[in-house]
């Protein structure tokens, strides 16, 4: 049975426990990051969170916020233990690179070199292809993320009967089967179970005294608990409005996919050990670990626009400015390593649905100001140019400004989605008037797109301009009859 908590109940606890009694290992006073995280936790309904920042090989900030246990009003401390879910895969990547440094395997080897009784279609797949989710293997979990059978052997035998999902290297598709196979390979090559190998070679080597493997069946001292705002509907994740308890079971053979429980401080120690040569001796190993796979068409792909590539167990954030390697897990935990900036940020939460990867960059902005969204970080080069000029013009005459920029620079190009995202970013900053002008610009640039009218209408409605909002919602529906919401919003505003 799932236990539900109302939003008001959650935040009565959060107000008491976050409002600036942030538990800190360093006993530091509340700073701008604490203020930012307090606001983010309230907006996203995050009960508890840990943050650790590493800069130049040292921990420079470590704070804990909110509740480890809502039911009993237990505060998060620096000892609270959080499940890092699929971030576990990054540890598996390090384990395999350790074996490669010892000459015991090579990630470019076919998996049939190490395992027998594989389907013919699997035999030529390489370890690297499994790691980067481009193998095309069928998944050992179903659409509701349940294993295919109740036993290890049952799931393994079932998945082997399923067809390949696509030609290897044609696309990126997140897949757990590959990591189960990698676990089998580590077991065979190392002579011990992969959990023991990782415990000895990484947890102990990095001084991670609390970190362990586990799931909801285990008694975890200092557990931060597990809550969720997510449901699976028609094999897709959807966000609900209530926070409720979450239960997860990770069989031992599945723990290359997920299963490590840790603290943000201990993850930070592990990152330091990884970068200072304690865990991997050769810099080339680290480079390879973080090098994203390239598809057959020459592109890289990942989870989304931000986390846009995948390497050896490590998702990657490939971009010109401040690139990062960013393991993400369970929609609740993430840590970004910024190699060019010599900074790493670890955020662990106990809410599935927190998705901290989408606000870690903003935390980085408190150390590297140009990374703040308000300073234009994350925008395309063309949108950045537009933004600079519009600030000078107080966002007036946006279309003319865009046209002039295009005349001066043939490479200047405003993508519809990028302009739309810029508008919503301005809304997030509380700049509704400026956002309205950006959405109007997008309508002028893309007059045949229903989506541009929809965003423009939404902002008009929020500013109280019902007449124009109705007009633009109707236009959005006319251009895209599948946008039933636009039609409904128009009727609602008209009082129908």
Image: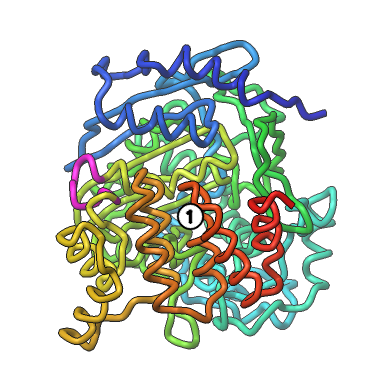
- Can residue 102 be seen here? The reply is no
* Residue 226, image quadrant: top right
- Is 122 above or below relative to 483? below
Residue nearest the observer in this picture, 474 or 180: 474
Determine whether, in the image, residue 32 is placed left or right of residue 490. Answer: left
Q: Please check the rendered image and state whether residue 161 is part of the magenta-colored stretch, yes or no.
A: no
**Badge 1 density bin: few <14, some 14–19, many ≥20, Cα 10 Å:** many
Q: Residue at x 63, y 84 (%)?
A: 167
Please tell me whether residue 156 is drawn above or below residue 268 in the rendered image: below
Residue 245 drawn at (x, y percent):
69, 29
| In-front residue for pair 95/387 | 387
Q: Quadrant of the N terminus?
A: top right
The residue depicted at 18 percent of the width and 84 percent of the height is 409
Q: Position of residue 432 (x, y in %)?
A: 38, 49
- Give the residue pinned by disc 1: 460
Query: Which residues are the magenta region?
Result: 365-373
Q: Position of residue 207 (x, y in %)?
A: 36, 32
Q: Quadrant of residue 217?
A: top right
């Amino acid at each position: 049975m799932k236990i539900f908590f109302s939003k008001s109940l959650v935040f009565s606890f959060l107000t008491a426990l976050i409002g600036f009694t942030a538990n800190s290992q360093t006993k530091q006073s509340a700073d701008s990051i604490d203020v930012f995280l307090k606001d983010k936790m309230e907006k996203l309904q995050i009960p508890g969170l840990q943050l650790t920042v590493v800069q130049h090989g040292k921990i420079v900030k470590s704070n804990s916020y909110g509740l480890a246990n809502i039911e009993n009003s237990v505060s998060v401390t620096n000892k609270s233990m959080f499940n890092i879910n699929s971030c576990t895969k990054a540890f598996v990547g390090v384990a395999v690179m350790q074996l490669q440094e010892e000459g015991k395997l090579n990630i470019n080897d076919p998996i049939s070199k190490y395992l027998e009784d594989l389907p013919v279609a699997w035999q030529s797949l390489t370890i690297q292809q499994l790691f980067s989710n481009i193998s095309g293997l069928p998944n050992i979990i179903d659409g509701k993320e349940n294993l295919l059978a109740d036993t290890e052997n049952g799931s393994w035998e079932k998945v082997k009967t399923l067809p390949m999902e696509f030609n290897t290297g044609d696309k990126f598709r997140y897949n757990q089967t590959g990591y189960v196979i990698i676990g089998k390979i580590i077991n065979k090559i190392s002579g011990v179970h992969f959990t023991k190998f990782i415990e000895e070679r990484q947890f102990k080597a990095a001084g991670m005294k609390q970190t362990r493997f586990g799931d909801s069946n285990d008694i975890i001292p200092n557990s931060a608990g597990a809550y969720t705002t997510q449901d699976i509907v028609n094999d897709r994740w959807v966000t609900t409005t209530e926070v409720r308890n979450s239960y997860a079971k990770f069989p031992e053979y599945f723990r290359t996919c997920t299963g490590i429980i840790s603290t943000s401080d201990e993850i930070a120690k592990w990152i330091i050990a990884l970068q200072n040569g304690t865990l991997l001796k050769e810099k080339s190993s680290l480079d390879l670990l973080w090098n994203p796979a390239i598809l057959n068409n020459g592109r890289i792909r990942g989870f989304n626009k931000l986390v846009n590539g995948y390497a050896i167990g490590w998702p990657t954030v490939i971009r010109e400015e401040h690139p990062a390697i960013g393991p993400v897990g369970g929609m609740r935990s993430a840590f970004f390593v910024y190699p060019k900036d010599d900074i790493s940020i670890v955020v662990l939460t106990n809410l599935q649905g927190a998705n901290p990867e989408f606000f870690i960059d903003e935390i980085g902005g408190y150390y590297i100001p140009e990374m703040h969204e308000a300073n234009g970080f994350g925008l395309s080069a063309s949108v950045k140019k537009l933004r600079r000029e519009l600030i000078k013009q107080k966002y007036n005459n946006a279309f003319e400004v865009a046209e002039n920029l295009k005349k001066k620079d043939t490479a200047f190009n405003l993508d519809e989605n990028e302009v739309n995202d810029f508008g919503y970013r301005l809304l997030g900053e509380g700049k509704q008037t400026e956002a309205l002008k950006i959405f109007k610009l997008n309508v002028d640039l893309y007059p045949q797109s229903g989506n541009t009218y929809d965003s423009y209408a939404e902002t008009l409605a929020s500013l109280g301009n019902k007449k124009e909002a109705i007009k633009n919602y109707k236009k959005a529906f006319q251009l895209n009859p599948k946008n039933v919401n636009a039609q409904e919003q128009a009727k609602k505003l008209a009082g129908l």
